[in-house]
Image (tube, rainbow, N blue to C red):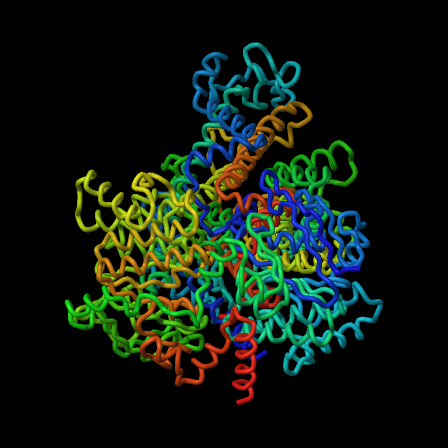
């Protein structure tokens, strides 16, 4: 297992480097673009004088690299901010203060994170179960009518945007049938049962489209495996269809499913933003949309970085899992 | 009752009739080889014996009885009992024939448990047992390895072990050694022979290689276009073939012991006198590494050789010996890590029109999207020729020179057979007016009769144009047939080099001796002699 | 999101070169797929509607931006007056709640925005992807390392989030649809660059490329003659799946209020307030949702068809059964 430990170590270092690179790119892109942040923050009726003052207050006059350096310092060691009269200490990891509310971005994110994590984690369980299950079923029923139906349904599933599914589900389930109340976030620690009931619909909306993709992938890789030579070997030795599909073909789908899952964490977070906005869940996504609309740059940058962190982390974990699932992969 | 009774077997894939009215019998404990070139339908017959065509859309007619089961009428349950239990199959490519994700012992145990009502533990023990039986050292530990952790030869042994697990009465081996190196092939064939002697099971061997058949069976059935051409004991079919096709097939098989044509041909002597034996291509201290760090490996290390005007230098070696890498460095497609190649005394880096190459794979060596004429015209255009008429004329001339029609200029590669494509590849190399052609396994992807034609063409062109050839191949017999001198490669080094007759007649290096002893012989007596030689070498 | 779908495509994409796939062969294979043909018809119709939007609305006698306060009941919060959300001979599909703008006009002009933005974004993605992918595959080791790492980072950043954030900081004076297309294009090229790089690396090793080098051609001629035709198939396949994905992303951004902004109509934007009105004016929800679904679905089916036509091997495993492949294998006999 020595090679494996080394592999995990190398991946960890690589992940750290990637995160640093992302922070540079994001910081440069957001703070060096043409939009005049001071003007927007100050408001349309500010005089040039006032705009200038705001710019100085937000350190927007400093060179870009210096500002990035301060940002990194804050991230590692924390930082003090003077807000008019008082001094606020922002402890590490500090992502700066919101232009709008002077709130610490880290605290803001920390408060919203449980909502988003609940949403994405729950949906992930759902899409993996639904998607892989459907995929296995259609590989098992290949060539039959039921498979054609499943294939059509999953194709339609991949073509339905999250917000369309969410809207329809909300209107039908909560509005017309009144099976569930309109979702309202309840913390898991407060009431697990209410937490689950309220998140059921958001989970479904987010999971359905992803599940469709997993169903397609699972089916495709199982069929691919079924066409391989080693399946012929087991057929030629009288091994039954149940074992061939359930044991050998399914095993071949593991690695691609893991890879797709890592790939889709990013798009699922994008979907989570839509879901949160649609269902009014107070998560990171909703906050991000708000920050974007009022051009609150520290919040936008902080959130993009945190999301990037999760995506890169998910990818690193998937890489390790992939290496375990597919032992033929050379560890580098 | 016979072990296998096939009567009037017909197999159709849509329009294509792969097997057409084939009948044969195989008695208990006997061994029969189905021999034929690609498209002869021999593998289709093997699959039909186990009913593997069921549910694939193929139409199967006639009757097939294996170990008392009527394969055509058998229920799924009966078929499953037959497969593995009564008749077991060993496939061509041992890597792709095993599930990459499970331990080899587990795969054998799984198959065993289909046919024997035993516990998981007992099945696992049985797997270790049979692995040990086929000569896998430390079987208990190795049974926990996955296929990619095994070498090619060990994988084929593992597949044979899987076949042995249920003690079948018939072993069907479909090209069991085609993917293996010649020394490993010899080991696997010896193993099959030993197992057959010990267990008394019948063997149906499917192969394109007449030598492999001669080594392993008592009876041969030669197939062509889905029909039986000739059927009888090995000694009579291979010793005194009655049918023209069999004779043609046998004549095309390159042999280690046949008289060599060409090497002492008068034209050559004249040529050598006209142009003194200068070196046209020289390599000194060639070395090539791939990758870096821990994964770095050296494909070619410290190779020096000289190619004289108008001669053919054979480079022979097993897979991984570095012979292809060497060939690519000689033509300038690969930069050596160290050492240099000199053409006419001048160092040459990068490609040089005077040094051309003929590639192994007739499929990938021609661009599928361009007509063959365009491919052949490439060197002409690159040289700056702009006159379309002259280009077409020259390309047509070259096509005719390699035995195709000039009118084929506008055809696309997929319209040609493998041998024809290889001819196009040769024409393209000739278009550059080369002095040297490096042929990298030019005939290994071709059927044996096509192989003979392409080899003959190369020899003709060489004499006519005074070309110097480097002939890189794994097949010792082919190399012997075409070369004046030969270099034997192993693990990136040349272990022996010299005139062909010396190297083949009295090999000095033990590895060369091992290689030569491993080549299957057509003559059963010679085969027995080589087997004895192999045992000696193995003991030494 | 249908980024998902793309990832599926990426993984399923075969990097081998289909033998002799000419344009004619492509049409022949595409023609045999009924679903893809129907989808192509639907897509053609949508493109026609988008192109002819001014003409169609002129026929109706309306335009997408004029307010009709007289057609909504301001006392009831702006519900359209009349049955079925105000459908009439003047307003074929009714009017928008609150503003009274003509729905038919907004829907057809919305098709322009959706398709236009998605196509433009795809063009940008493909251009960047091919350039960087080929450069990485043919460049020196360090170039490859640098570009591949950069691509990894771009792929890791969620497209939605980055576009959302980027759209916030660009001055609003910039034409919004162009901006949305650019942003999606500049962020979403990662997977296509990866595919192009992998395919170019595979092609580069093929013997016919070596043969072309031996003929004396330079790098550029070889790239043009031997490599570019070879990467066309996977690029077209992937691009065909990028279009519906980009449509979804544009709609999502507009839905969130940061994409195409009023008064320019967009399907995503129309859905923003639709849930409030679904009882009073159901078509206000159903029309843009249906249009989005039909468009994305048709493009996806068409994309699948294109893939099948370009890469029959990948297709045979996406279709049914395994018999076909074994059959042809067996027919080739032992030495295949």
Q: Nearer the viewer, residue B171 or A208?
A: B171
Q: Nearer the viewer, residue B129 or B277?
A: B277
Q: Nearer the viewer, residue B414 or C15?
A: B414
Q: Can you see residue A302?
A: yes
* Location of residue A64 in the rendering, given as x and y in whole percent from the top left corner: 34, 59
* Location of residue A106 in the rendering, given as x and y in whole percent from the top left corner: 54, 61
Name which quarter of the figure residue B276 lies in: bottom left
* Location of residue A33 in the rendering, given as x and y in whole percent from the top left corner: 36, 49
* Location of residue B290 in the rendering, given as x and y in whole percent from the top left corner: 38, 71
Q: Is residue A92 left or right of residue B262?
A: right
Q: Is residue C102 left or right of residue B107?
A: left
Direction bottom: furthest residue: B540
Q: Is residue B433 left or right of residue B370?
A: left
Direction top: furthest residue: C89
Decide: is B137 above or below C155: below
Name which residue lies at 54% across and 74% down: B527
Name which quarter of the figure residue C185 lies in: top left
Quadrant that contains the N terminus of chain A: bottom right
Q: Can you see residue A27?
A: no
Decide: is B316 above or below A288: below
Name which residue lies at 80% across and 75% down: B122
Decide: is B344 above or below C238: below
Decide: is A85 above or below B284: above
Q: How many marks?
A: 0
């Amino acid at each position: 297992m020595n090679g494996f430990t080394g592999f995990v170590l190398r991946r960890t270092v690589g992940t750290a480097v990637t995160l640093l690179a992302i922070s540079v790119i994001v910081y440069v892109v957001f703070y060096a673009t043409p939009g005049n942040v001071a003007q927007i923050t100050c408001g349309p009726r500010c005089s040039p004088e006032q705009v200038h003052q705001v710019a100085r207050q937000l350190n927007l006059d400093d060179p870009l690299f210096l500002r990035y350096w301060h940002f990194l310092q804050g991230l590692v060691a924390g930082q003090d901010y003077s807000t008019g009269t008082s001094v606020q200490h922002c402890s590490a990891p500090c992502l700066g203060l919101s232009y709008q509310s002077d709130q610490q971005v880290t605290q803001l994110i920390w408060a919203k994170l449980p909502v988003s994590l609940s949403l994405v984690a729950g949906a992930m369980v759902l899409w993996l179960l639904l998607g892989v299950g459907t995929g296995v079923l259609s590989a098992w029923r290949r060539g039959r009518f039921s498979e054609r139906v499943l294939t059509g349904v999953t194709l339609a599933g991949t073509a339905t945007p999250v917000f369309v599914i969410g809207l329809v589900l909300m209107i039908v389930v909560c509005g017309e049938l009144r099976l569930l109340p309109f979702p309202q976030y309840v913390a898991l620690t407060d009431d697990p049962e209410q937490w689950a009931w309220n998140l059921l619909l958001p989970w479904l909306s987010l999971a359905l489209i992803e599940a469709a993709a997993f169903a397609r992938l699972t089916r495709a890789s199982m069929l691919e495996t079924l066409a391989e030579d080693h399946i012929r070997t087991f057929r030629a030795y009288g091994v039954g269809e149940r074992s061939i599909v359930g044991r050998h073909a399914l095993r071949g789908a593991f690695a691609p499913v893991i890879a797709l899952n890592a790939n889709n964490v990013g798009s699922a977070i994008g979907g989570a933003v839509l879901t949160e906005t649609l269902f009014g869940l107070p998560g990171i996504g909703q906050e991000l949309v708000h920050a974007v609309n009022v051009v609150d740059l520290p919040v936008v940058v902080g959130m993009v970085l945190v999301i990037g962190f999760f995506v890169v982390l998910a990818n690193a974990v998937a890489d390790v899992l992939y290496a375990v699932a597919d032992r033929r992969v050379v560890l580098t | 009752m016979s072990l296998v009774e096939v009567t009037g077997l017909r197999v159709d894939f849509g329009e294509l009739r792969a097997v057409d009215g084939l009948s044969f019998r195989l008695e208990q404990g006997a061994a029969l080889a189905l021999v034929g070139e690609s498209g002869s339908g021999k593998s289709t017959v093997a699959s039909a014996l186990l009913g593997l065509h069921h549910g694939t859309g193929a139409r199967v007619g006639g009757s097939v009885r294996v170990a008392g089961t009527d394969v055509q009428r058998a229920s799924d349950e009966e078929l499953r009992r037959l497969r593995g239990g009564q008749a077991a199959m060993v496939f061509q490519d041992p890597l792709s024939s095993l599930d990459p994700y499970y331990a080899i012992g587990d795969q054998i145990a799984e198959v065993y448990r289909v046919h024997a009502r035993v516990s998981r533990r007992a099945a696992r023990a049985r797997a270790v047992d049979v692995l040990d039986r086929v000569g896998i050292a430390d079987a208990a530990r190795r049974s926990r390895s996955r296929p990619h952790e095994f070498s090619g030869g060990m994988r084929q042994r593992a597949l044979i072990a899987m076949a042995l697990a249920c003690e079948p009465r018939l072993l069907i081996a479909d090209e069991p050694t085609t993917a293996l190196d010649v020394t490993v092939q010899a080991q696997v064939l010896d193993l099959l022979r030993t197992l057959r002697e010990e267990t008394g099971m019948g063997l149906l061997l499917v192969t394109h290689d007449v030598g492999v058949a001669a080594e392993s069976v008592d009876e041969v059935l030669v197939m062509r276009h889905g029909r039986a051409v000739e059927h009888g004991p090995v000694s009579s079919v291979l010793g005194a073939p009655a049918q023209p096709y069999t004779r043609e097939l046998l004549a095309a098989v390159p042999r280690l012991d046949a008289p060599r044509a060409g090497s002492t041909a008068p034209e050559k002597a004249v040529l050598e006198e006209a142009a003194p034996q200068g070196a046209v291509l020289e390599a000194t201290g060639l070395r090539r590494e791939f990758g870096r760090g821990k994964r770095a490996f050296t494909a070619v290390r410290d190779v020096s050789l000289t190619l004289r005007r108008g001669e053919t230098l054979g480079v022979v070696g097993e897979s991984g010996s570095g012979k292809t890498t060497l060939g690519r460095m000689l033509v300038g497609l690969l930069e050596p890590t160290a050492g240099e190649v000199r053409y006419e005394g001048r160092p040459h880096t990068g490609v040089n029109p005077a040094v051309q190459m003929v590639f192994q794979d007739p499929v990938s060596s021609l661009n599928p999207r361009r007509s063959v004429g365009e491919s052949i015209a490439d060197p002409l255009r690159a040289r700056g020729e702009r006159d379309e008429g002259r280009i077409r004329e020259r390309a047509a001339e070259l096509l005719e020179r390699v035995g195709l029609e000039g009118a084929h200029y506008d055809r696309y590669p997929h319209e040609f057979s493998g041998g024809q494509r290889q001819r196009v590849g040769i024409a393209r190399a000739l278009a550059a007016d080369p002095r040297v052609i490096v042929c990298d396994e030019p005939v290994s992807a071709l059927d044996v009769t096509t192989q003979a034609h392409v080899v003959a063409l190369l020899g003709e062109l060489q004499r006519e144009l005074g070309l110097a050839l480097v002939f890189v191949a794994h097949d010792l017999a082919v190399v012997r047939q075409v070369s004046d001198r030969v270099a034997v490669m192993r693990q990136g080094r040349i272990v022996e080099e010299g005139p062909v007759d010396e190297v083949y007649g009295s090999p000095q290096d033990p590895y060369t001796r091992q290689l030569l002893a491993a080549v299957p012989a057509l003559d059963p007596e010679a085969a027995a002699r080589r087997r004895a030689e192999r045992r000696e070498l193995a003991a030494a | 999101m249908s980024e998902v779908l793309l990832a599926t495509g990426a993984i399923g994409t075969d990097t081998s070169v289909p033998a002799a796939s000419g344009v004619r062969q492509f049409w022949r294979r595409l023609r045999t797929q009924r679903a893809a043909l129907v989808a192509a018809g639907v897509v053609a119709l949508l493109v026609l509607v988008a192109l002819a939007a001014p003409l169609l609305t002129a026929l109706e006698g309306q335009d997408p931006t004029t307010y009709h306060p007289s057609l909504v009941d301001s006392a009831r919060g702006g519900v359209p007056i009349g049955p079925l959300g105000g459908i009439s001979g003047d307003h074929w599909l009714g009017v928008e709640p609150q503003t009274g703008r003509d729905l038919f006009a907004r829907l057809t002009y919305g098709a322009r925005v959706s398709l236009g933005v998605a196509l433009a974004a795809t063009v940008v993605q493909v251009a960047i992807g091919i350039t960087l992918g080929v450069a990485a595959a043919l460049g020196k080791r360090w170039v490859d390392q640098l570009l591949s790492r950069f691509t990894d980072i771009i792929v890791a950043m969620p497209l939605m989030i980055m576009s959302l954030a980027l759209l916030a900081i660009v001055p609003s004076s910039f034409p919004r649809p162009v901006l949305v297309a650019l942003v999606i294009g500049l962020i979403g090229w990662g997977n296509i660059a990866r595919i192009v790089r992998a395919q170019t690396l595979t092609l580069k090793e093929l013997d016919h490329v070596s043969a072309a080098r031996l003929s004396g051609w330079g790098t550029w001629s070889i790239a043009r003659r031997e490599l570019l035709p070879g990467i066309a198939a996977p690029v077209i396949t992937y691009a065909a799946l990028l279009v519906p994905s980009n449509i979804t992303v544009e709609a999502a951004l507009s839905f969130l209020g940061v994409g195409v902004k009023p008064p320019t109509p967009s399907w995503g934007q129309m859905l923003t307030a639709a849930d409030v009105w679904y009882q009073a004016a159901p078509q206000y929800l159903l029309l843009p949702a249906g249009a989005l679904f039909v468009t994305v679905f048709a493009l996806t089916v068409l994309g699948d068809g294109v893939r099948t036509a370009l890469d029959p091997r990948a297709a045979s495993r996406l279709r049914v059964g395994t018999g076909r492949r074994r059959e042809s294998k067996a027919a080739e006999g032992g030495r295949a």
